[in-house]
């Protein structure tokens, strides 16, 4: 059976733990991942974790960041516009951009394709594959709201990083997992990242 991955794009917004949780959630159920990390996201990863993410050492750096086996991850440099996910003929199951900066939201909404993350997103939308975008910055300007509406109308699921508290989370990790769980639910991927609401007792 040929490999058909989920593309995960990590942009420069604060919130890289959400990306980590989504990637680990996919890998935990043997879902292959094609990873694109923007240049700005490398700075955010370094700022939020103290870890470097380098093209030449991506496998070691990613394994350290995820604390997970990365054998089923394929990494594509953000500047590689000849990469597989840049073409609609490259088979993928869909794409998640997590976290999504307002710059990434704008670039995808207007079809700039200035780097591989934006191009892969454009391809995913034009091919009508599942696409989830997780904006993290707040508050939103009118232009960002308009860009998010444009993406919604193009077929994207706009899933803000707004965790719920009804499961009485005891840690930040549980709040992060809540968002990762919502992303995986939207993709139709099984997981056990959160306690589901079962109604009032």
Image (cartoon, grey):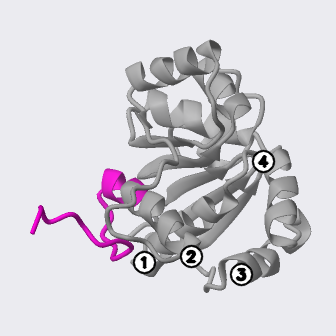
- How far apart marks 3 and 4 lie (CA) works out to 18 Å
Secondary structure of residue under mark 3: helix
Q: Which residues are magenta?
A: 183-201
Position of residue 79 measured from the top left corner of the image (x, y, whole percent):
83, 43
Q: Nearer the viewer, mark 1 or mark 3?
A: 3
Q: Nearer the viewer, residue 9 or 75?
A: 9
Asked whether the beta carbons under mark 2 and mark 1 sit within 8 Å of each other, the answer is yes
Mark 3 vs mark 2: which is more N-terminal? 3
Is 106 contained in the magenta span? no
Mark 1, secondary structure of its residue: loop
The secondary element bearing badge 2 is classed as loop
Residue for badge 3: 63
Q: Nearer the viewer, mark 4 or mark 2?
A: 4
**Residue where numbered disc 4 is placed:** 38
Q: CA gap, disc 1 to disc 4?
A: 25 Å
Q: Is residue 18 left or right of residue 198?
A: right
Question: Which residue is located at x 63 percent, y 14 percent?
Answer: 143
User: Which residue shows up at 65% across the image and 34% down it?
Assistant: 119
Element marked by disc 4:
loop
């Amino acid at each position: 059976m040929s490999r058909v991955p989920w593309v995960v794009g990590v942009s420069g917004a604060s919130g890289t733990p959400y990306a980590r949780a989504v990637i680990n959630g996919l890998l935990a159920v043997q879902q292959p991942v094609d990873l694109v990390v923007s240049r700005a996201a490398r700075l955010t990863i370094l700022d939020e974790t103290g870890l470097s993410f380098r093209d030449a050492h991506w496998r070691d750096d990613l394994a350290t960041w995820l604390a997970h086996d990365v054998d089923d991850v394929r990494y594509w440099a953000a500047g590689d516009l000849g990469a597989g996910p840049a073409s609609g003929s490259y088979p993928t199951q869909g794409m998640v951009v997590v976290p999504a900066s307002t710059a990434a939201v704008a670039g995808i909404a207007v079809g700039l394709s200035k780097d591989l993350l934006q191009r892969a997103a454009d391809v995913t939308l034009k091919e009508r594959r599942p696409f989830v975008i997780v904006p993290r910055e707040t508050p939103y300007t009118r232009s960002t709201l308009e860009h998010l509406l444009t993406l919604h109308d193009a077929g994207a699921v706009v899933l803000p990083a707004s965790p719920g508290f009804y499961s009485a989370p005891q840690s930040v990790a549980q709040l992060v997992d809540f968002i990762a769980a919502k992303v995986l639910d939207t993709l139709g991927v099984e997981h056990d990242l959160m306690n589901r609401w079962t109604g009032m007792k």
